[in-house]
Image: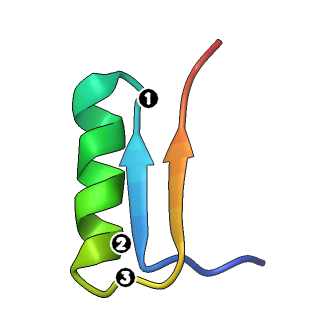
Amino acid sequence: MAEYDVIVVGAGNAALAAAVSAREQGARRVVALEKA
């Protein structure tokens, strides 16, 4: 099973900004999930 430091649910502009911010603050593994 994969392990992530941050999981962002949703992939709108705010979610993508949150993922980028988490990465900039040191999170190594970030995933964004979107329901299609």
Q: Residue 33: x and y, percent?
A: 55, 39
Q: Residue 11: x and y, percent?
A: 44, 29
Q: Which residue is drawn at 48% across and 85% down?
A: 28
Q: Specify which label sits upstream in the sequence, 2 or 1.
A: 1
Residue 15 sits in which quadrant? top left
Residue 11: image tag: 1
Which kind of residue does numbered mark 2 sit on? Answer: Arg
Q: Which residue is drawn at 41% across and 30% down?
A: 10
Q: Distance between the residues labelled 1 and 3?
A: 18 Å
Q: Is residue 35 above or below residue 2?
A: above
Q: Which residue is drawn at 36% across and 22% down?
A: 12
Name the element at disc 2: helix
Q: Distance between the residues labelled 3 and 2?
A: 5 Å
Residue 13 sits in which quadrant? top left
Residue underneath mark 2 = 23
Instruction: Indicate left or right for 12 with 21 as reference.
Output: right
Residue 27: image tag: 3
Instruction: Indicate left or right for 26 with 4 as reference.
Output: left
Q: Residue 17: x and y, percent?
A: 26, 43
**Colouring used for the render:** rainbow
Q: Do the residues labelled 3 and 2 touch (CB within 8 Å)?
A: yes
Q: Residue 14: x and y, percent?
A: 22, 31
Local crowd size for mark 2, using a 10 Å CA cut-off: few (<14), some (14–19), many (≥20): some
Q: Nearer the viewer, mark 2 or mark 1?
A: 2
Name the element at disc 1: loop
Residue lying at the far right of the rendered structure? 1
Which kind of residue does numbered mark 3 sit on? Answer: Ala
Local crowd size for mark 1, using a 10 Å CA cut-off: few (<14), some (14–19), many (≥20): some
Placement of the C terminus among the 4 image quadrants? top right
Q: In this view, does 20 lie above or below 10?
A: below
Which kind of residue does numbered mark 1 sit on? Answer: Ala
